[in-house]
Image (cartoon, rainbow, N blue to C red):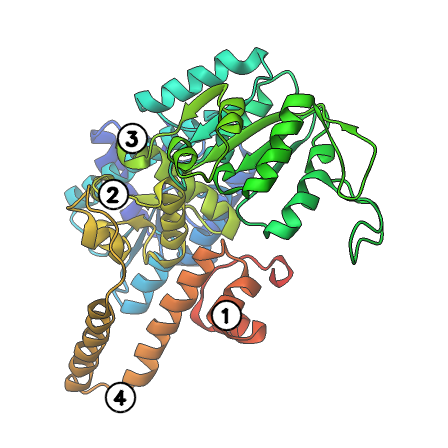
Amino acid sequence: MKPIWIVDDDASIRFVLEKALAREQLPTRSFTQPREVLDALADGAQPGPQVLVSDIRMPGGSGLQLLEQVRERLPGLPVIIMTAYSDLDSAVSAYQGGAFEYLPKPFDVSKAVELIRRALQESQREDVAEQQLADAPEMLGQASAMQDVFRAIGRLSQSAVTVLITGESGTGKELVARALHRHSPVAGGPFVAINTAAIPKDLLESELFGHERGAFTGAQAQRRGRFEQAEGGTLFLDEIGDMPFDLQTRLLRVLSDGQFYRVGGHAPVKAHVRVIAATHQNLEQRVKDGAFREDLMHRLNVIRLRLPPLRERSEDIPMLARHFLQRSAAQLAVAPKRISDAALTRLARFAFPGNVRQLENICHWLTVMAPAQLISEQDLPPEVLQEGDAPHRAPQPAATAAGEDWERALEREAEQLLASGRSDVWDLLTRRFESRLIGTALAATHGRRMEAAQRLGIGRNTITRKIQELGLGGSDENGL
């Protein structure tokens, strides 16, 4: 077992903790100042810490600065900050820096040991989670329905047969398509995806098949379509159920004959492409409604894979949540947050109408908005807390009452602050409002500041200044 590192310039504190932890058969290693800790980490000759317990004020350095530097190297390491200066600023700074817990001096030794034991359990849990993430394949899922999907991908690995993937929006149909491509005989070729519902009807034909120069106004040069771009690989046709009816005929001809014509062209072009299609629609019903060709449905439906909604695989939610929190932290260049068992239990009760994509977005939101490194049940977004006890309830449209609720809550908060005699109510509430609003926009855009600013209706310079003032994260990406 890796040791618990103790950093304190007070020899009596080090001695008390060493003896108390030794009685618990927990190994320790002690230091008198932060520089010794950083040198030991850089040396790497001995095992690193399982938990770090550090004083906040020491000659030669600050425990908060040490916390920041250690978390850059070991983001999952639980750090307990001790201090004899039990002031608000120290506590807030410790938690904002990612401390596991804040321990004011003088402390009860038994309670300190209990706290270190909790940190050890968290560290071991994080080690397991990180190992699972490191070893995780391109798709995650322990539920039997997902295991069926994995087995199907394995069985199809020696074939380039056409596959139809069905499932609700947000279930990960493109991930499955990419996995099918990676584990196929055409894996060496390109993977090209197109959402047939997202492209206007008059442009979709050119997008799929390309066009010749002069085929229409603005066609100043020959253009290769997605079929040609995917030559020797896989073409993924997402939301195929929404494809315009006349283009379905052209697609059927390509699948039948293995060739197509560019828009305005007269020479056939051979298509050596594997086609994978996906839809959230009921194609059989679309056929009955006259909106989808029955012969095309049968041509696409050689092998059908159904992806289960997240509510049917709730046992996968903890694994997915930890994975998304790790990935979100990496994208935003911040330390990954941990999530409590109570929060995971509440998430598992949520219906997730947006499926895995919604869970991913929630994890982005938590990475930005959760106030502490350990996410509690109360930190979860309102939609989860409100709907957590009704897992099978259909999503309801936002009502006027919802707007009135938060406005009334704002009024009550203002009333309480004004009644307390505070003189900074405007700044306090404005800062909290802006922090929540900008943080939510950054989470929704995966940290892209310019996109967040555009969606909020503010300028790029404004959001950059506000992020700095409010201490929010977010990747720069040249403002993209």
Q: Quadrant of the N terminus?
A: top left
Tell me, for residue 423, which label it has, or none. 4
| Amino acid type of the residue that numbered disc 2 sits on in the rendered structure | Ala
Q: Which residue is rendered at x = 21% and y = 40% of the image?
A: 345
Q: Quadrant of the C terminus?
A: bottom right
- Label located before the other in sequence (3 or 2): 3
- From mark 2 to mark 4, how far is it between C-alphas? 43 Å
Say if 183 sits above or below 218 in the image.
above
- Label located before the other in sequence (1 or 3): 3
| Amino acid type of the residue that numbered disc 1 sits on in the rendered structure | Gln
Q: How far across and down, in percent of the image, does residue 121 sit?
A: 27, 34
Q: Which residue is mark 2?
A: 351
Q: Which of the two discs, 1 and 2, sits closer to the camera? A: 2
Relative to 275, 472 lies left or right? left
Label 4, secondary structure: give it: loop
Q: How far across and down, in percent of the image, does residue 311 sit?
A: 27, 36
Q: How far across and down, in percent of the image, does residue 25 sit?
A: 25, 27
Tell me, for residue 313, which label it has, or none. 3
Relative to 391, 76 lies left or right? right
Say if 67 sits above or below 18 in the image.
below
- Mark 2 near mark 4, Cβ–Cβ under 8 Å? no
User: Viewer-proximal residue, 95 or 151?
Assistant: 151
